[in-house]
Image (cartoon, rainbow, N blue to C red):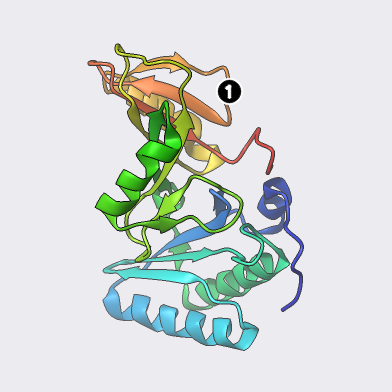
């Protein structure tokens, strides 16, 4: 499986099966429903065999009734034709055994920390979480080496903002699910603070002002 050129997210989105796959934070993810644990495990075994044959290995999470497959090309810190090809293979395997996708369950969470002095603040979070530097071109990101906890990133502040919380969640969702997620948050008592950067992200707050962003791959430099 060749192709090491980093692909724009729009190209990848158009190239993969929309029944299954969505681009999230430079990764390609699909979540499949399984009738039981045994069916999910059998599907994972077939994905593993295909990944070995292609020498391109995704992250796979198996739970009762659910299998999540996430692929990216670590050498370019993004998506390549290798990921598109692997996605096509996984889609074919899912179709063979009759698995369907659960697109809304495909999402990723990040924690953003606003800081005046990022070099001073970042080492604390790296140590207390036992995280590692995020590989690739993100100079301040931190990731869980076990691949379980959310990534942390640091946003530069110019001056203190005492009336605003300085830690917020970034919830990256499939691009075609974003507006529904925003609407659901508002219906649950939240407020839309800003949509000026939509569809890259919407800024929301709960009734007490704690903030979260709903994010997609769209309208960004990587799109």
Residue 20 seen: no
Tell me: 220 left or right of 135. right
Residue 220, image x, y percentages: 65, 36
Front residue of this view, candidates 23 and 95 = 23
Residue 143 sits above or below residue 42 on the image: above
Residue 1 in view of the camera: yes
SS label for mark 1: loop
Name the residue: 44% across, 41% down.
Answer: 153
The residue closer to the viewer here, 207 or 102, is 207
Work out which quarter of the rendered image holds the N terminus and state it.
Answer: bottom right
Query: Residue 149 in the image: x percent, y percent?
Result: 32, 55
x, y percentage for residue 152?
Answer: 39, 45
- Name the residue furthest front: 120
Q: Residue at x 36, y 47 (%)?
A: 123
Q: Is residue 137 left or right of residue 146?
A: right
Above-or-below relation of 25 to 216: below
Q: Please give the residue where the numbered disc 1 appears in the rendered image.
A: 197
Front residue of this view, candidates 13 and 149: 149
x 35%, y 57%: residue: 131
Mark 1 neighbour density, 10 Å: few (under 14) some (14–19) many (20 or more): few
Position above or below: 104 against 201: below
Residue 203 appears in which quarter of the rendering? top left
Number of marks in the image? 1
Q: Quadrant of residue 75?
A: bottom right
Say which quarter of the image contains residue 159. Answer: top left
Which quadrant holds the C terminus?
Answer: top right
């Amino acid at each position: 499986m060749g192709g090491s050129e980093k692909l724009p997210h729009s190209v990848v989105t158009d190239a993969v099966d929309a029944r299954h796959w969505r681009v999230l934070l430079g990764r390609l993810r699909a979540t499949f429903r399984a009738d039981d644990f045994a069916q999910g495990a059998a599907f994972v075994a077939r994905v593993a065999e295909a990944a070995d044959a292609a020498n391109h290995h995704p992250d796979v999470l198996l739970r009762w009734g659910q299998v999540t497959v996430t692929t990216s090309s670590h050498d370019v810190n993004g998506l390549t034709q290798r990921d598109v090809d692997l996605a096509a293979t996984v889609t074919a395997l899912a179709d063979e055994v009759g698995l369907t996708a659960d697109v809304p369950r495909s999402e990723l969470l990040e924690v953003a920390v606003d800081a005046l002095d990022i070099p001073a603040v970042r080492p604390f979070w790296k140590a207390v979480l036992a995280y590692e530097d995020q590989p690739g071109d993100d100079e301040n990101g931190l990731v869980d080496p076990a691949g379980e906890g959310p990534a942390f990133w640091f946003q530069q502040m110019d001056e203190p903002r005492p009336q605003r919380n300085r830690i917020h969640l970034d919830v990256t969702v499939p691009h075609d699910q974003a507006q529904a997620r925003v609407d659901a948050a508002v219906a649950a008592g939240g407020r839309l603070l800003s949509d000026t950067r939509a569809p890259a992200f919407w800024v929301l707050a709960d009734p007490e002002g704690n903030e979260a962003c709903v994010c997609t791959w769209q309208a960004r430099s990587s799109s």
